[in-house]
Image (cartoon, rainbow, N blue to C red):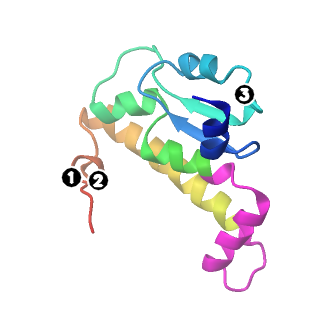
Amino acid sequence: MAEEGFRRCFGDDTEVVFDFHGYPAAIHQLLHGRPRPDRFHVRGYIEEGTTTTPFDLLIANQVTRYHLAAEALRRLPDRVRHSIGRTVNTDHTDAGADIDALADDYERRIMASREEILRTGTDPETIREWRWTG
């Protein structure tokens, strides 16, 4: 990608959470020489152990919707964190903490899903039966 197109897509200082179907190193190689490659947080295939279910594979690779949402929330700039947090926290005491609590909730969902997979050998119903709405 030409430098101008790259900057239009990713800017020069925006934190980027990138989910890739292959090895994260392949994306890191493509980022070499680009502005601040350390701001790219690439998730992808990790060869590690065995899996029992499709969602278990996503957990092993740290690419579930919960992983990606928590990662994106934690990498929001402070000004955005507080703006989003105020929509939930109407007394504005610590609006940014609401974002951390939401990210923590996603991590708890990962652990609970993993425990259920190990216990039952199947993905949780909330994962198996989930459908796009709207």
Query: Badge 2 local density, few (<14 within 10 Å), some, or many (20+)?
Result: few
- Do residues under tags 1 and 2 come within 8 Å of each other at their CB atoms? yes
Quarter of the image that includes the N terminus:
top right
- Kindly state the secondary structure of the residue where label 3 is placed: loop
First in sequence: mark 3 or mark 1? 3
Task: State which mark lies toward you, 3 or 1.
Answer: 3
Task: State which mark lies toward you, 3 or 2.
Answer: 3
Q: Which residue is mark 3?
A: 34
User: Real-space Cα distance between discs 3 and 1?
Assistant: 41 Å
Identified by mark 2, the residue type is: Thr
Identified by mark 3, the residue type is: Arg
- Kindly state the secondary structure of the residue where label 2 is placed: helix
Q: Nearer the viewer, residue 27 or 81?
A: 27
Where on the picture, by quarter, is residue 10?
A: top right
- Residue 12 location, x and y as percent? 75, 42
- Residue 83 location, x and y as percent? 70, 72
x 62%, y 78%: residue: 87
Magenta stretch: give its range: 73-96
Q: Which residue is mark 2?
A: 126
- Residue 24, compared with residue 100, is above or below; it is above
* Main secondary structure of the magenta stretch: helix
- Residue 62, compared with residue 16, is above or below; it is above
- Residue 103 location, x and y as percent? 59, 54
Going by the image, does 74 lie left or right of 68? right
- Residue 17, compared with residue 31, is above or below; it is below
x 63%, y 36%: residue: 6
Q: Pick out the residue farthest to the bottom.
A: 91
- Kindly state the secondary structure of the residue where label 1 is placed: loop
Going by the image, does 95 lie left or right of 59? right
- Residue 73 location, x and y as percent? 62, 54
Q: Which residue is mark 1?
A: 129
